[in-house]
Amino acid sequence: MSQVRTYNSPMREEKARETHEAILCALFELMDSASAADEISMEAIARKAGVQRRTVFRHFATKDDLLAAFWPWLNARIGASTTPRTPKDIVDGPRQAFPRFDMHDAAIRSSLHSRTGREMRMGTVAGRRANFRRALAPAISSLQPAEAEKVEALAHLLFSASAWEILKDYGGLTGAQAGETASWALEVILSAVTPGHSPAEVTNQRDKQ
């Protein structure tokens, strides 16, 4: 019997991983096509994933747990880093992420304007703030706390799906143009608060180390 359990355990683990991924993919596909993301039920997710409703709850005890897992999964899927480590990572973030948002326009907009999406994003705020604060530290360490807070807030704004949407809808830009614009703005801001650095030097400081 011990040999059977040893043989089956990796198979069960692999099946569990596949089911876990299928559930997240199902939610993504529903958000990418739903006219009202808040109407996406656990039953609909289960049907889309091809599993029983109880299977969804075995992987995610509550819908909140599912949403908490979904947002970082979505960012990883579209290649948008949520863990910048340096000022350069933050500056380059919009340039890299915004064109990818274009490829998942409906899902990104749904994450911005639906209650479901807001719940997902708000669950990541504390971690995002900590990551941005650490990443920006070399550029803003000499600032007064109130000024550093302003720079951090602007970084959150410019490196966000909200900025992508506004620059596209109000500015008439493509995702790529929106990314370049937001990254340029971040370069200007950081150059203004980093003594002796031009925008280009702020962007390239990591490469010179």
Image (spheres, rainbow, N blue to C red):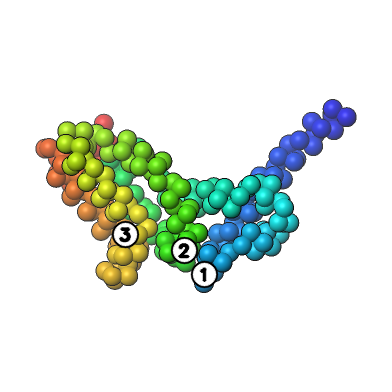
Task: Say which residue label 1 marks.
Answer: 36
Q: Are marks 2 and 1 in contact (CB under 8 Å)?
A: yes
How many other residues sit within 10 Å of disc 1, few (<14), some (14-19) or many (≥20)?
Answer: some
- Dot 3 amino acid type: Ala
Locate the N terminus and report the quarter of the image it occupies. Answer: top right
Return the x and y of residue 20 as percentages of the image width and height: 64, 48
Q: Is residue 207 above or below residue 36?
A: above
Question: Marks 1 and 3: which is nearer the front?
Answer: 1
Taking depth in this image into account, of 96 and 104 the one nearest to the observer is 104
Return the x and y of residue 197 as percentages of the image width and height: 14, 40
Q: Looking at the image, tell me whether mark 2 or mark 1 is earlier in sequence order.
A: 1
How many other residues sit within 10 Å of disc 3, few (<14), some (14-19) or many (≥20)?
Answer: some
Q: CA distance from mark 2 to mark 1?
A: 7 Å
Is 207 on the left-hand or right-hand side of 147?
right
Residue with the most extreme top position? 2
- Dot 1 amino acid type: Ala
Residue with the most extreme right position? 1
| Identity of the residue drawn at 25% across and 58% down | 181
Return the x and y of residue 156 as percentages of the image width and height: 31, 49
Q: Looking at the image, tell me whether mark 3 or mark 2 is earlier in sequence order.
A: 2
Q: Is residue 79 visible?
A: no
Secondary-structure class at tag 2: loop
Question: Marks 3 and 2: which is nearer the front?
Answer: 2
Residue with the most extreme left position? 196
Q: CA distance from mark 3 to mark 2?
A: 17 Å
- Dot 2 amino acid type: Ser
Task: Say which residue label 3 marks.
Answer: 163
Secondary-structure class at tag 3: helix
Task: Say which residue label 2 marks.
Answer: 114
Q: Is residue 179 visible?
A: yes
Return the x and y of residue 196 as percentages of the image width and height: 11, 37
Q: Is residue 12 above or below residue 172?
A: above
